[in-house]
Image (cartoon, helix red, strand yellow):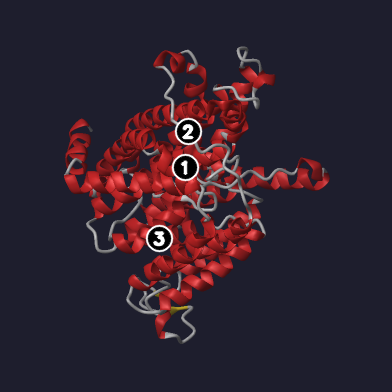
């Protein structure tokens, strides 16, 4: 483990990889600070650049963006009361009142310090958990892998925003998309409708660009007509004293724990962890009292920001061990693995350990870069916050189109991306979590292959999927999730006021 991690740091310690991590983190902080933009969108825009890069440098850039956006969202939340990312909405509750008192620099300092602490501790948690889970997963047979994939799909459908029916609908759309084209085992065409462009399947890059690029821009066009006035232009980031942060250990330790654990649950991500950790700290706080939260107390910034950044480590745990993304950004990175010729899932640690340890090394390096970038470039980010955001969306659409085109050097993926963008936009407006579409498209071929292989090895006996206790446990988990959601739906139907809609992952 230590040897592999050391090799990961050596690999990521090259000048090129360090530069890519730095540039990605700086871009991530910038993107996160701009309301209407997001980590998935930034990664999608840069996706065509990664096609020509080696695998580790490509992921060095993507991990930097992923980490940077976590902190960047707090800048606009504190200074504009307009969260740059959904997960930073909680930070605005105390960050903005603190800035109104003339303590904007200190509020940004608390956000930066707690984000760094949460990111580092989340990394430690990921380093400890990934080898253990991966070691267990290596003993998985085809039926186990198929059941893990099915459980992941059901978990995302159950925990994402809206009802499980909407979540499963997205999953089914993704599964249908993944089945288009030549069947790799029987060599028959499926759902091509006589179109030669469909024979090799629907381009995965076009799916990613459409769902996370075009659809998001269509949904956020309304941001261009909304104005937000910057609270102050004269801000110097003021880092709080270490002892000041240590005496508030309950805030950052609770936030980190929630971020690491909840971040590892597919489909929940930072949105859920920040609010849950904030509510926990608020309800259990004695000094300051619970009623002080929302008036500008440091704990109200420390808790959600440490939780927000700890989810980066948590979300990588299922992605690197089971092939199940924890949120939208890791879903795109999982898709990028497929496009770089990797096979995500339980065999990734066995087949490509250098990728796993390289990603972990990049995560810690990006977290450290994030701190120094925020310290040295706060005035630059404030300058950008004063600019008109509407000019960015046309450029995003252009770069997203280039990304789709570059995947095969034909216009067909561009048409698919536009179509998927419209479909994703319409589904998102109706409360369907579009991340489930991408996850279905990623895991569909893996599940199908292992189901058919498991049946072939068992002589066509479906009982092989409950032939061991771990498989029985996975089947029971899927059944419990489905039963719980059906039960909640029945209760909500009897009492509509109790119908809840958890937020979707970033």
- The residue beneath circle 3 is 45
Q: Nearer the viewer, residue 358 or 322?
A: 358
The disc, 1 or 2, on the residue closer to the chain's N-terminal end is 2
Q: Left or right of 271: which side holds 365? A: left
Residue under the point 54% across and 60% down:
390
- The residue beneath circle 1 is 382
User: Can you say whether 360 is above or below 421 in the image?
Assistant: above
- Badge 2 marks a residue whose secondary structure is loop
Tag 1–tag 2 contact (CB < 8 Å): yes
Q: CA distance from mark 1 to mark 2?
A: 8 Å
Res 55 visible: yes
User: Can you say whether 483 is above or below 196 in the image?
Assistant: above
Disc nearest the viewer among 3 and 2 = 2
Q: CA distance from mark 3 to mark 1?
A: 23 Å
Q: Left or right of 100: which side holds 54? A: left
- The residue beneath circle 2 is 235
The disc, 3 or 2, on the residue closer to the chain's N-terminal end is 3
In the displayed image of the protein, which residue is found farthest to the front?
A: 234
Quadrant into which the N terminus falls: top left
């Amino acid at each position: 483990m230590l040897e592999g991690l050391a090799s990961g740091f050596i690999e990521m310690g090259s000048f090129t990889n360090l530069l890519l991590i730095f540039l990605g983190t700086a871009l991530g902080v910038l993107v996160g600070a701009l309301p209407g933009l997001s980590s998935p969108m930034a990664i999608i825009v840069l996706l065509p650049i990664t096609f020509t890069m080696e695998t580790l440098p490509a992921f060095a850039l993507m991990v930097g963006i992923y980490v940077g956006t976590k902190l960047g969202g707090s800048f606009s939340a504190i200074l504009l009361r307009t969260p740059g990312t959904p997960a930073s909405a909680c930070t605005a509750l105390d960050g903005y009142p603190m800035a109104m008192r003339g303590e904007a620099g200190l509020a940004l300092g608390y956000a930066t310090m707690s984000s760094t602490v949460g990111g580092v501790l989340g990394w430690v948690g990921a380093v400890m958990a990934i080898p253990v889970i991966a070691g267990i997963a290596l003993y998985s047979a085809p039926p186990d892998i198929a059941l893990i994939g099915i459980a992941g799909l059901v978990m995302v459908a159950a925990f994402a925003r809206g009802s499980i029916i909407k979540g499963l609908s997205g999953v089914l759309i993704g599964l249908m998309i993944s089945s288009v084209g030549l069947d790799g085992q029987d060599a028959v065409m499926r759902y091509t409708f006589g179109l030669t462009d469909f024979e090799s399947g629907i381009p995965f890059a076009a799916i990613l660009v459409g769902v996370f690029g075009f659809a998001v821009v269509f949904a956020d066009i309304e941001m261009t007509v909304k104005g937000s006035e910057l609270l102050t232009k004269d801000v110097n980031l003021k880092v709080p004293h270490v002892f000041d942060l240590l005496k508030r250990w309950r805030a950052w330790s609770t936030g980190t724990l929630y971020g690491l654990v909840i971040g590892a649950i597919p489909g929940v991500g930072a949105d859920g962890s920040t609010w849950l950790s904030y509510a926990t700290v608020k309800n259990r706080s004695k000094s300051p009292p619970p009623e002080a939260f929302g008036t500008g107390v440091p704990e109200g910034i420390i808790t959600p920001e440490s939780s927000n950044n700890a989810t980066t480590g948590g979300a990588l745990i299922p992605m690197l061990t089971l092939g199940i993304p924890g949120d939208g950004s890791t879903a795109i990175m999982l898709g990028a693995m497929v496009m770089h010729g990797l096979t995500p899932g339980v065999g990734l640690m066995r087949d490509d350990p250098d990728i796993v340890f390289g990603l972990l090394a990049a995560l810690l390096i990006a977290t450290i870069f994030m701190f120094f970038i925020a310290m040295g470039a706060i005035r630059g980010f404030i300058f950008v916050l004063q600019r008109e955001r509407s000019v960015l969306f046309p450029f995003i659409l252009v770069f997203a189109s280039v990304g789709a085109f570059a995947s095969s050097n034909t216009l067909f993926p561009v048409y698919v991306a536009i179509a998927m963008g419209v479909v994703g936009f319409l589904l998102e407006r109706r409360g369907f979590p579009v991340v489930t579409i991408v996850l279905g498209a990623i895991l569909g071929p893996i599940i199908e292959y292992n189901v058919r292989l498991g049946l072939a090895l068992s002589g066509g006996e479906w009982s092989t999927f409950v032939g061991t206790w771990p498989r029985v446990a996975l089947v029971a988990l899927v059944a419990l999730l489905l039963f719980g959601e059906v039960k909640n739906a029945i209760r909500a139907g009897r009492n509509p006021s109790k119908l809840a809609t958890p937020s979707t992952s970033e």
